[in-house]
Structure formats: C-alpha cells, structure tokens
Amino acid sequence: MTNNHRALLYLTMLFVSMLSSTISGTPNCPVEADPASILSCVAIDAVGLVQATKGNLRVFCTMAERFMECVKTKTRGCLGEEFVRGSLTELIELSQKCCVNNNEKVHDECPFVSRPQCFSLNDTVQTPTGDEISIGNLQIGQKVLAFDYGDQIIPTEIIAMLHYDDKSPALFYTFTTDSGHQVSLTSEHLIYIGNQNYVQARHVDSKLHQLFTIQQDGQLEASSIRSIDVQLKHGYATPITQHGTLLVNSISSSCYASIHHHSIGHLAMAPLRWIHQTKQIFGLINKNETNENGIHWYPKALNNIVHTFVPFPELFTTTAGKL
C-alpha cells in the first residue's frame, strides 16, 4: 500500500472513529446494535478517493454515492444522525461538481480534473532579504529566491501569475522531507529531484526520489521523502519567475505544470519574460496590482492551441481540454 493510499485510509478511519464517538444509541440505531457495521463504509470511501486521484471519476462517483448511502443507513435513527449528514456536506458538493451525466461537462471546480494549477496559497516563498511571503500574496515584480542550473540559490522576479483562485478546491500532493520541510503541489506540477531532473508530483516515489531543500549555509541539499499525503485544499496559484524555478517552503520546485519537461515549459513561457522585460524598460510594472481569480490570457491561448493542433501530444499532459 502506498503512502497516498495509507493517508486516505487513515483519514477515513479517523472520520469513522469521530462518528462512533458522536453517535449515541437508541433502540433503532444500527450502529448501537453493531458498532462494527460502520466500518463497512471505510473501504468504499478509501477506494473511491484513490481512484479519483488517478482521474477515474466514474469509480469515484459510484463509490461516493455508495459511501454516503452506507453512512446514512448505518446512522439512521441515531441521536447523532444530523451531525453525520452535516459532515457529509463536502463530499456531497464534490459529487455534484464531479459526477455528471455523459453529455454534461464536469464543473470547473471539480478538484480531480487536471487544470493549470500549482501551489497552495498558504505555502511561502522567501525574499533575498529573508522575509517570507505567502504564495497567495505574491505580486508581479517582487524578488524571491530561486535556483539556477548549477543548483545555486539566486534572486529572481515574479513575472506573471498564470492561474489564481482563492476559493476553489484542488487536490494536492503534500510532501514531507526528513529535514522537516513540507510543500503541496497539484498532481501534474513538476518538482525538482536533482541533476536538472524534474518529475510530476503524482509520479514522485519516496523510495526512488529525493527533494532538495535550502540549508542555513544557503546551499541546496538532498533530503529523503518521509511521507506523501493527498489532501484537498481550497485556493491555489501559479507564480512564474524569470528563471522558471522557485523555492517554496525552502523546497526546490519548477514553476511549470501539465508538461513532462521543465525545459520545454521554460521555453514556452519565453514570450512572458520578454513582455515583462519590456515593461521594466518603460516602467510599466505595477507592483501594487492585486491578484484576481482566473487564468492568464497567455497560458489559456497556448493551451487552446495545443488542444486544437496537438503537434506534440507526448509533451503536454493536461486533461483539461480547451480553457
């Protein structure tokens, strides 16, 4: 069983234990008659969420429906029934957004559908002066720490926010290293694993890969991965820097997603760097501009071109289709 699967199972078992401690027995309460019966719902929830992380929405929707009906049936007639129904609100909302008929489009806020996403808004970056700024508060033109092709820490500028949303849910892979560092990335986002190699978050293997963190001496150092958890969080942002890299929570990461090769992503964003440099020359950069929800026009146009002509289908991995 992988770390992702264990995390989902543990979360579900925790949820079930909370239900058991909250529900008081009545003569008609199934859980009171047989407390172990509620455990029959655990496998349904765990399997459904695992399949959702793999993009299999049909299995997730079937499992989610069975899970909700299972929990409701097992707690019907119990004193804690209303609490149980309230605790299922988020799962119900996910089902409504992700589980649609064959001829209907999945809602844009379904977190299991790959879209241009990136970092959790609550994660932070560091400025050259040592200050920490949350991803959600980054602004165009701010200087932050990144790393170059020689793994040296360098200052760089935020040149664009490709995608920003402070409300919608997204599914994150949260990596915790042996050094105690932690970062959250969406499934198709690239993370640095050393020797100028990057891998998408969903393909990181704690037994094969190491992440690189900044140490007190200002150097990058490899650190083993202690755990990989799958978490549902609200809010995400995709900041792009001049160098295409970023240190998030002191962990080295690429700025690019929905692509296999970091170098191709950096090449594709070259026009944005040229535009930013031109604005710098003419003093047109507004460092007080606030981030607004939505997708930047350039990646939206690039994405639609790719999905129209598909010249290099092996390079791009997003399943979102046209935006």
Image (cartoon, grey):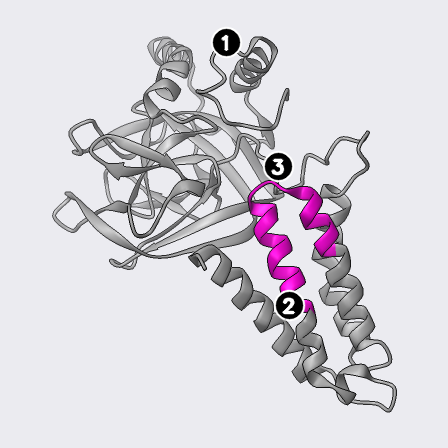
Would you say residue 63 is visible in this rendering? Answer: yes
Q: Which residues are magenta?
A: 41-64
Q: Which one is closest to the eye, mark 3 or mark 2? A: 2
Q: Estimate the x, y position of residue 31 in percent, counting from the top left.
A: 76, 83
Residue 61 on the magenta span: yes
- For residue 229, what is the image quadrant? bottom left
Q: Residues within 10 Å of mark 2 (few under 14, many from 20)?
A: many
Is 159 on the left or on the right of 136, as rendered? left
Outermost residue, left side: 217
Is 40 on the left or on the right of 170, as rendered? right
Above or below — where is 68 with respect to 159? Answer: below
Compare residues 135 and 44 and report the one nearer the observer: 44
Is 44 on the left or on the right of 270, as rendered? right
Q: Earlier in the sequence, mark 1 or mark 2?
A: 2
Dominant SS in magenta: helix
Q: Which quadrant is the C terminus positioned in?
A: top right
Q: What residue lies at 75% left-to-right and 43% top-to-bottom?
A: 99
Q: Which residue is mark 3?
A: 113
Q: What residue lies at 47% left-to-right and 13% top-to-bottom?
A: 312
Asked if disc 1 and disc 3 are in contact, CB closer than 8 Å, the reply is no
Residue 50 on the magenta span: yes
Q: For the residue marked with disc 2, what is the amino acid?
A: Val
Q: Which residue is mark 2?
A: 42
Q: Earlier in the sequence, mark 3 or mark 2?
A: 2
Mark 1 and mark 2: span between their CA atoms?
44 Å
Q: For the residue marked with disc 3, what is the amino acid?
A: Val
Q: Which residue is mark 1?
A: 311
Compare residues 205 and 145 and report the one nearer the observer: 205
Mark 1 and mark 3: span between their CA atoms?
23 Å
Would you say residue 79 is visible in this rendering? Answer: no
Compare residues 66 and 10 and report the one nearer the observer: 66
Q: For the residue marked with disc 1, what is the amino acid?
A: Pro
